Amino acid sequence: MTFSFIFIGSTHGFINDFIKQKEVINSVNPEFVLCEDLEDISLDSKEKFQELLKKGRISDMTSFDELKELIRLCHDKNIKLIGIDMHNFGFDNILQEKIKKQEELSKEEEKKIKEILKIREQIHLKKILEFKTKTNKSLVIILGSWHLRENSSLRNSLNNYKIFFPCDEKGNLLIEPPQNKKINYCEIIKNDK
């Protein structure tokens, strides 16, 4: 069965996300991989890949080291790697520092983050739909697992998809490290005709 969209939930580093990404990309061999963590960077030519590999920097919010293997894999396989988010995820300097240091946020800052998250999800959906028109192959999309929760706008807006997501022993989607450290991958398929 061919899916229009294949999502891979990312933990943003509490496990080695690249292992599952590599497995899926190698089995699907897509034309495009869309990636939240690449923010607003598009690597759609050998020159752009080489430039980023040489520069070795994504942004203040995303570590190059977290994406280095994915960037190299897509470069070597001649797959276009496209960022589908805002630079620094739309966070200003104050929010960036508080998020990175995991400091407590004020009510106003929490409200601001919720607003930014809604905008980001709209951008994700818009980019996904845009790139689906550019290929007949499945799109592989790498997003933080939180964006793939059951009531997310992506899951409610799209059809004909498969989701690979990190889960605990009971099959619950993980958005933070589990207590018992045991992590599996679960799958969800939606294909309403």
Image (cartoon, rainbow, N blue to C red):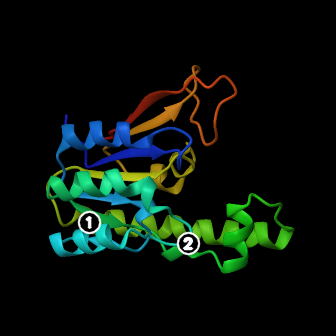
Q: Is residue 166 above or below residue 153?
A: above
Nearest the eye: 22 or 189? 22
Mark 1 burial class by Cα count in 10 Å: few <14, some 14-19, many 20+? some
Residue at the disc numbered 1: 131
| Residue 40 occupies quadrant | bottom left
Q: Count the labels in the image.
A: 2
In the displayed structure image, the side of residue 193 where residue 147 appears, left or right? right
Residue at the disc numbered 2: 60
Residue at screen point 67% across, 79% down: 93
In the displayed structure image, the side of residue 113 where residue 56 appears, left or right? left
Mark 2 burial class by Cα count in 10 Å: few <14, some 14-19, many 20+? some
- What secondary structure is marked by label 2? loop
Residue at screen point 40% across, 44% down: 8
x and y, in percent, of residue 191 in the image: 32, 39
Identify residue type, mark 2. Answer: Asp
- What secondary structure is marked by label 1? helix
x and y, in percent, of residue 36 in the image: 44, 61
Q: Residue furthest bottom?
A: 92
Q: Is residue 31 visible?
A: no
x and y, in percent, of residue 57 in the image: 43, 70
